[in-house]
Amino acid sequence: MTSLRLDPLRRLALALLLAVAPLASVLAAERPVVILLSWDGVRHDYPERAQTRALARMQREGARAERLIPVFPSSTFPNHVSLATGTYVDRHGIIGNRFTDRAGRRFDYSNDASWIEAEPLWVAAERQGVRAATFFWVGSETDWRGRGASYRITPFDESIGEAAKVDQILAWLDLPPEERPGLIMAWWHGCDHLGHEEGPDSPGIAAQLLAQDAELLRLLAGLDSRKAWDHTTVMVASDHGMTALEALADADAPLAASGIPARVASGGGDAQVYLGDASQSDAALAALARVEGIRAYRAETLPLSYRSHFPGRSGDLTLVAEPPRVFARPTFGQKALAALRRLRGGSRGAHGYDPEHPDMGAIFFALGRGVPAGAKLGAIRVIDVAPTAAALLGIGPPEQSEGRALFQTDSNSDAKP
């Protein structure tokens, strides 16, 4: 029988290793976790319409913004990318839900990260050693410049509900500490579809919000049972609000009547005009000035706050409608449906308007590590969300981020303004 003999130096090294290993395991288990949920199309005032237990808890024990100001255009894809990059459309390049660039490439609700020109949050996290997980977040399905989230659910499937998303988030949290993601980002249905179909004043909004809230409540309960709040922060944001629409603004007809070849790409409350001959921009502006309730801008005359012109993708002119108008070519069928809806007392909803319009304001709630209880944040910006998540994770924000962190934490996880 033989025995293993170690010299004193090796015995000391082994003792140190055995002492440090449990500490390393504890530290890994307590690494910060940030869960960012997007609730599509939830206007800032919707939570007052229902007894939302989960959102009410987040407001009571955490923080709520008076409203979250979107970027222009106040539509889904531009704002999800701004939520993730911390910057504006003129830097990240996603100018709408649908557009065609000057090279003829078509962007149509695309989840291909190659379209994004600014670093997304999940890439910034992975670059700095924090595992990320995404569930249907815009642009997360493919790698961005050679790097992507460690865990990603693809392809996008609108039929998948929030129950499956909560199950997956909790499953990610139950992974061994060394495999667990520190950043989790998930898109939820919110109230967008119902707001479009029935308008923002529909009684169904409250019911839909309660259904979303029930799954959020289940997620919070899962964090309770796992005793995870000392290292976990949950943030719930939306991408834009919703306003009622009553009239159609036709930008095609006056251009055609003036003999100006042009293509109008509209996204609700905003539109891009691609002229066949750029030298006709003055004539186009004059023709469009006759359309009630819209404003037209060249790139150099856009309001500075819009930050939306991206060369090679944006049109020669940008149009903005005034609610309750929405850009569309009014066909006979559309007019008949609109008239019938008005007779029945119903309406539809739209977004894409000036971000400062009150109805475009979105929601923001936060709860957990680093969030002062009962904090009232006032009006904040979509571009502040990514740097806030990064600060809570203890990493730098995405490279092109221009927002500010709403919360800071020190090594003891105490909240700081």
Image (spheres, rainbow, N blue to C red):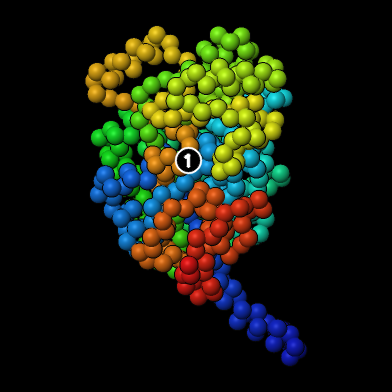
The quadrant of the rendering that contains the N terminus is bottom right
Q: Is 225 placed above or below 217 here?
A: below
Using a 10 Å C-alpha cutoff, classify the residue at mark 1 as few (fewer than 14 neighbours), some (14 to 19) or many (20 or more): many
Give x and y (percent) for residue 175: 51, 58
In-front residue for pair 89/163? 89
Judging depth in this view, the residue of 61 and 217 nearest the camera is 61
**Under tag 1, what secondary structure?**
loop
Closer to the camera in the image, 361 or 203: 361
Residue 106 seen: no
> Residue at the location (54% across, 50% down)?
383
Number of numbered callouts drawn: 1
Q: What residue type is labelled 1?
A: Pro
Q: Position of residue 122 (x, y in %)?
A: 60, 50
Asked if one can make out residue 87 in the rendered structure from this viewpoint, the answer is yes
- Nearer to me, 112 or 261: 261
- Please report the residue visible at 29 percent of the width from the left and 44 percent of the height from the top: 210
In the figure, residue 14 lies in which quadrant?
A: bottom right
> On the rendered structure, is 314 left or right of 296?
right
On screen, residue 278 above or below 190: above
User: Does 342 sit above or below residue 366?
Assistant: above
Q: Which of the 4 image quarters holds residue 81?
A: top right
**Residue 295 as seen in the image, left or right of residue 55:** right
Residue lying at 74% horizontally and 85% vertically, measured from the top left = 10
Expressed as whole percent of the image width and height from the top left, the position of residue 330 reads: 43, 14
Give the residue drawn at x 37%, y 34%: 243
Q: Name the residue under label 1.
A: 355
Find residue 337 and report its horizontal and vertical position in percent: 34, 15
